[in-house]
Image: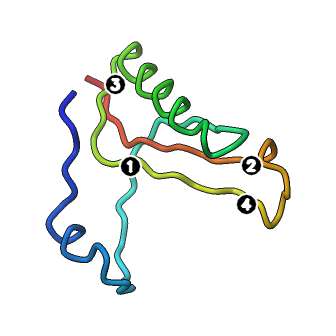
Amino acid sequence: MKPLEPPPEIKEMAGTDEVRLKTVPAREVAYLVHKGPYSGVQDSQLKLMRWLGENGYELMGPGIAVFHNDLIITRNEEDLITELQFPVRKK
């Protein structure tokens, strides 16, 4: 699997603090819900990537992390809930 390169418009905007709007098309995603500290998210991403390979899917773009709560709400890292989504297609 080759590494993903950010699109030119994203590279251009990086570090500018600019806010824009865009429409995001519907797409199929494989997802996993990680519960616990953010330091464990990378292991969950690897688990999701392994699942893709084992189940005949390929990655179709950058992943998205949805933070369903934060430390202001939960006050305990073990209660953090992060949804990881990777856009996919069946090989």
Q: Which mark is residue 70?
A: 4
Q: Secondary structure at mark 2?
A: loop
Q: Are marks 4 and 1 in contact (CB under 8 Å)?
A: no
Question: In the image, what residue occupies the spot 72% across and 39% down?
Answer: 35
**Image spot of residue 89 (x, y percent):** 31, 33
Which dot, 2 or 3, sits closer to the camera?
2
Residue linked to disc 2:
80
Q: Which mark is residue 27?
A: 1
The C terminus appears in which quarter of the rendering? top left
Q: Secondary structure at mark 1?
A: loop
Answer above or below: position of 72 versus 5: below
Residue type for callout 1: Arg
Query: Quick one: label 2 or label 1, which is nearer the N terminus?
Result: 1
Query: Quick one: label 2 or label 3, which is nearer the N terminus?
Result: 3
Residue linked to disc 3:
57
Which dot, 3 or 1, sits closer to the camera?
3
The N terminus appears in which quarter of the rendering? top left
- The residues bearing labels 2 and 1 have C-alpha atoms spaced at a distance of 26 Å
Q: Are marks 3 and 4 in contact (CB under 8 Å)?
A: no
